[in-house]
Image (spheres, rainbow, N blue to C red):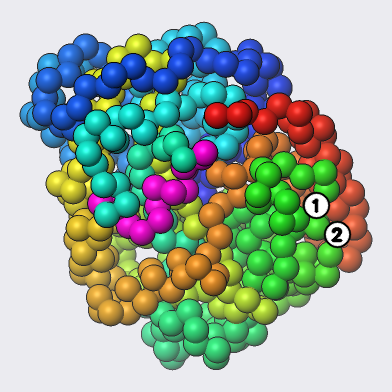
């Protein structure tokens, strides 16, 4: 799930969730909770068809075809799993349209507006299934993961993956050529600052205007509107937004937001170590920009782990994010979700159990470099990553565990805030003026701050009196 796949799912979904589809889904979808679910995990007793919605993507689809589907056919032969593949930017709109049409959807995943789903009564409460199976999910999965989608003491999803926060991916060949040591793997290393990262980026940038030029850095942390201010010790959002999922205002017009966006603009136009939007688009036409070998350091979400599985032409490695005033970062925890309106829930549960089994997640992690969520599957992931990157298990574990240390880790607001795609699309539309150097950050932040406040207030007014009671 690169930024152009995983996160553009939300960009494409913004209008649909904000408008007609939301109204069409209404306040209630399908039936209520599961009635007397059949226990047994992957016992093989299920029958009928299970619709499983996935998005298009080389790494994900390859793993589904080579790992999950053969295992499903072997272990659940009486269940016909219909894997529905849609383009990434159509994924969330497809969930909404299937719900609105009452078209059965047994399983979906891959992030999204979890609390928006819950608010609109889209996900099935899975607590009765978990209880019937006597499944100790807290001992089975990595610590705290299942609590991420536990609301009012009810489980609304089964842990699918964790990105282990955000990360810096570097081209080791370019660093070696420039005589630079790899960046630190220790998130507590006080020497690894934004100024030091800029020093690295400057030395790594060569002939940036030429076809064969290289850029030292790509600061693409998703979502920039949230991630960048974190690094400068601030927050675009109020505390209320994280606890109530809506808020009547933002903190966007603040000094940390200004400092962060000034730094971003300066990387492109003052220091010239990061490609401008036109150049980035051109690099993207050749494939993943980092994989072209023309970006020395990429800072983004933990999907950089699995997109790195395609790199064959140069050596690479992973490091901690540099610190501005903080290295707080976003963690993306995804879930398998069962549609509340689904018609074959018991069989869907057996499929969900298999998709999250140690055997399946281990094989999937080894093939795709996707971090698994079962505790016993994690070693296979780190060993596969170590083999590919040449880094030691100790160093990789420092990168992974340091990112999700509670003192610096924040669950992604796109999983928490109602109508987050609306906030994100509003920001993205305005960001062009900054990244194309049409407006200086000092003028841009106050202007956009007013727009973000208006957007947050409109969402707040829409939902403030409709919070679900269950």
Range of the magenta residues? Answer: 140-152
Q: Nearer the viewer, residue 445 or 253?
A: 253
Question: Where residue 393 sits: x, y (%)?
Answer: 25, 75
Residue 221, quarter of picture: bottom right
467 shown above or below 160: above
Residue 250 marker: 1
- Badge 2, how many Cα within 10 Å: few under 14, some, many 20+? some
* Image position of 350 with respect to 80: above or below: below
**Residue 320 in picture, x, y percent from top left:** 47, 75
Q: Residue at image x 55%, y 29%?
A: 470
Using the image as rendered, state which of residue 118 and residue 54 is in the foreground: 118
For disc 2, the marked residue is 253
Q: How many marks?
A: 2
**Residue 117 vs residue 139, the one in the foreground:** 139
Q: Secondary structure at mark 1?
A: loop
Q: Residue at x 76, y 33 (%)?
A: 464
Q: Residues within 10 Å of mark 1 (few under 14, many from 20)?
A: many
Whether residues under marks 2 and 1 lie with C-beta atoms below 8 angstroms apart, the answer is yes
Residue 301 or residue 2, whichever sits in front: 301
Quarter location, residue 264: bottom right
Tell me if 51 is positioned left or right of 425 in this view.
left
- Whole-angstrom CA distance, mark 2 to mark 1, is 8 Å
The numbered disc on residue 329 is none
Q: Where in the figure is residue 347, as x and y percent of width and height?
A: 24, 20
The answer to whether 434 is drawn above or below residue 174 in the figure is above
Say left or right for 48 vs 61. Answer: left
């Amino acid at each position: 799930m690169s930024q152009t796949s995983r996160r553009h799912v939300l960009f494409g979904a913004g209008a649909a969730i904000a408008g007609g589809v939301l109204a069409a889904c209404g306040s209630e979808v399908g039936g209520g909770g599961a009635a007397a679910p059949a226990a047994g995990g992957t016992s093989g007793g299920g029958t009928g068809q299970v619709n499983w919605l996935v998005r298009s993507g080389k790494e994900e689809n390859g793993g589904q075809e080579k790992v999950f589907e053969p295992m499903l056919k072997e272990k659940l032969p009486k269940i016909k799993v219909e894997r529905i593949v849609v383009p990434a930017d159509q994924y969330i709109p497809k969930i909404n349209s299937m719900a609105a049409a009452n078209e059965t959807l047994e399983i979906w995943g891959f992030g999204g507006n979890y609390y928006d789903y819950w608010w609109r009564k889209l996900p099935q409460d899975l607590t009765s299934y978990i209880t019937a199976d006597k499944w100790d999910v807290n001992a089975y999965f990595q610590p705290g993961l299942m609590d991420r989608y536990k609301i009012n003491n009810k489980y609304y999803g089964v842990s699918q993956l964790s990105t282990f926060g955000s990360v810096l991916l570097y081209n080791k060949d370019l660093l070696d050529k420039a005589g630079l040591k790899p960046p630190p793997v220790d998130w507590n290393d006080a020497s690894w600052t934004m100024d030091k990262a800029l020093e690295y980026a400057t030395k790594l940038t060569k002939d940036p205007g030429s076809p064969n030029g290289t850029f030292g850095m790509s600061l693409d942390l998703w979502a920039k509107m949230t991630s960048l201010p974190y690094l400068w010790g601030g927050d675009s959002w109020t505390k209320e937004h994280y606890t109530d999922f809506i808020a009547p205002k933002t903190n966007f017009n603040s000094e940390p937001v200004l400092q962060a966006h000034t730094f971003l603009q300066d990387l492109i136009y003052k220091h010239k170590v990061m490609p401008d939007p036109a150049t980035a688009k051109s690099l993207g036409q050749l494939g993943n920009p980092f994989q072209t070998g023309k970006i020395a350091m990429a800072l983004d979400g933990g999907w950089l782990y699995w997109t790195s599985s395609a790199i064959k032409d140069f050596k690479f490695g992973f490091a901690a994010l540099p610190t501005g005033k903080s290295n707080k970062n976003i963690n993306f925890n995804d879930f398998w979700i069962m549609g509340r309106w689904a018609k074959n829930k018991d069989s869907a549960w057996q499929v969900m159990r298999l998709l999250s089994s140690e055997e399946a997640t281990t094989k999937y992690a080894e093939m795709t470099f996707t971090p698994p969520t079962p505790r016993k599957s994690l070693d296979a992931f780190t060993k596969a990553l170590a083999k590919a990157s040449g880094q030691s298990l100790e160093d990789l574990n420092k990168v992974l565990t340091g990112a999700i240390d509670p003192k610096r880790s924040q669950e992604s607001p796109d999983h928490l805030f109602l109508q987050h795609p609306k906030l994100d699309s509003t920001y993205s539309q305005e960001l062009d003026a900054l990244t194309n150097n049409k407006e200086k950050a000092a003028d841009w932040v106050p202007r956009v701050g007013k727009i973000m406040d208006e957007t947050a207030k409109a969402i707040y007014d829409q939902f403030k009196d409709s919070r679900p009671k269950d």
